[in-house]
Image: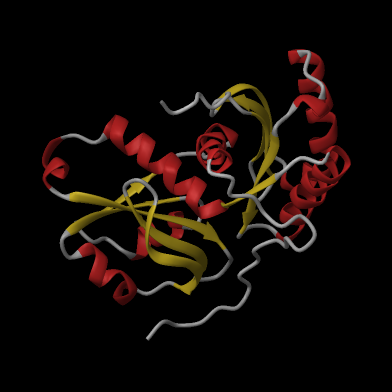
Amino acid sequence: MKPDIPMALLLNIDTATSFASVGFSRDGIILSMKVNEAQKEHAAFLQPAIESLTRELSIGLEEVDGIALTIGPGSYTGLRVGLSSAKGIAYALDKPLIAIGTLEVMAYAAEKEWARLAIGDDEDRSPLFCPMIDARRNEVFTAIYAPGGVILREPGPMILSEYDFEPFIENNVVVFSGDGSIKWKLAYPHSAARFLLVQHSVVDLAVIAEKHFRIGDFGALAYLQPLYLKEFHKNS
């Protein structure tokens, strides 16, 4: 008989984009969270938010089983803020660090919202999920996922072109989300393209992080760096 795995208590940190959130989760479910929508204030927001949550929940940081964070891509400053805080806590308390890609968290949030909203003829077409982070001009950080977080196109930078999506949209509905999809919506009126306004948060991060915790998929604390993905190129 397989032994029971105790429910993990995780501190979840997401400062990768303009919307930052932090929260404690148990067994993948957020107990409480704080959010900040002023990107330039993420550094000032994070530590006071963590301290406030520990008081609210009567949880000591030494009680957590691990620290989860979005590792990138995203804002250069935001990624450094999140990782430096997560590393500091993990090192001081000798706790594992769980690094999750920002786009994976965004895709999960979109998939969850799509399952709640999708009706009508879209039920006959398999959905794919394409989160996009705005990188100015006609550039985004993006990836493509099948349901369940299966990667069909690896996370990377892209100069937007309709030809890049032809292999995926021919037989599927492609659900675009994230702030980078706002400008793409105006330029890509494909009948099988769907655009979803959904904000990811540590609620979504916690679900994915719990799965990684249970299989012991931890980042190397000494060597972990933000996933910047700064170089842009056209795909052939």
Residue 229 seen in the current view: yes
Q: Residue at x 35, y 46 (%)?
A: 148
Q: Does residue 71 lie above or below 159 as drawn?
A: above
45 horizontally vs 202: left or right: right
Quarter occupied by the N terminus: top left
Quarter occupied by the C terminus: bottom left
Front residue of 4/16: it is 4
Quick one: which residue is furthest to the bottom in this view? 236
The number of numbered badges drawn on the structure is 0
- Please state the horizontal and vertical placement of residue 40, each as a whole percent of the image: 78, 48
Q: Residue at x 15, y 41 (%)?
A: 123
- Please state the horizontal and vertical placement of residue 84, each as a whole percent of the image: 82, 51
Q: Quadrant of residue 2?
A: top left
Front residue of 194/31: it is 31
- Please state the horizontal and vertical placement of residue 197, each as a whole percent of the image: 42, 41
Q: Does residue 100 lie above or below 141 as drawn?
A: above
- Please state the horizontal and vertical placement of residue 42, each as a whole percent of the image: 77, 43
12 horizontally vs 162: left or right: right
Q: Residue at x 80, y 49 (%)?
A: 87
Q: Residue at x 37, y 74 (%)?
A: 161
Quick one: which residue is furthest to the front in this view? 1
Q: How is the image coloured?
A: secondary structure
7 horizontally vs 193: left or right: right
Residue 197 seen in the current view: no
